[in-house]
Amino acid sequence: MQDAVAVIYHDTFAPVFLGLALVYACGIVFALLLPGGRLSDDAPAPLAAVSDVDRQPA
């Protein structure tokens, strides 16, 4: 009985842990591919508001 339960747990959780391992590996690859340095703390200038005239279809 214990072997049957172990097989059920293995069959159920193996794909979950495989998916988590793939996500973890992708995160490491993406982190290594990011450019070095830190992001600026400066806030960007606000964008100019678009007037209603600019929004009219041609």
Image (tube, rainbow, N blue to C red):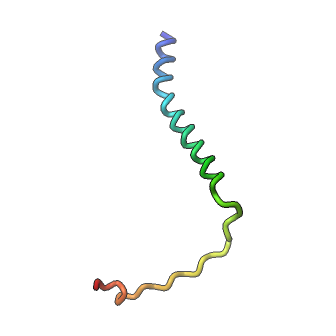
* Quarter of image, res 56: bottom left
Q: Nearer the viewer, residue 35 or 9?
A: 35
Q: How many marks?
A: 0
Q: Position of residue 3 (x, y in %)?
A: 50, 12
Q: Position of residue 13 (x, y in %)?
A: 50, 28
Q: Position of residue 19 (x, y in %)?
A: 51, 37
* Quarter of image, res 22: top right
Q: Nearer the viewer, residue 26 or 48?
A: 26
Q: Is residue 54 left or right of residue 37?
A: left
Q: Position of residue 9 (x, y in %)?
A: 49, 22
Residue drawn 59% across the image and 48% down it:
27
Residue drawn 57% across the image and 46% down it:
26
Quadrant placement of the C terminus: bottom left
Q: Is residue 56 above or below residue 29?
A: below
Residue drawn 46% across the image and 20% down it:
8
Q: Is residue 51 above or below residue 10?
A: below
Q: Is residue 25 left or right of residue 13?
A: right
Q: Nearer the viewer, residue 1 or 40?
A: 40
Residue with the most extreme top position: 1
Residue with the most extreme bottom position: 53
Residue with the most extreme right position: 37
* Quarter of image, res 39: bottom right
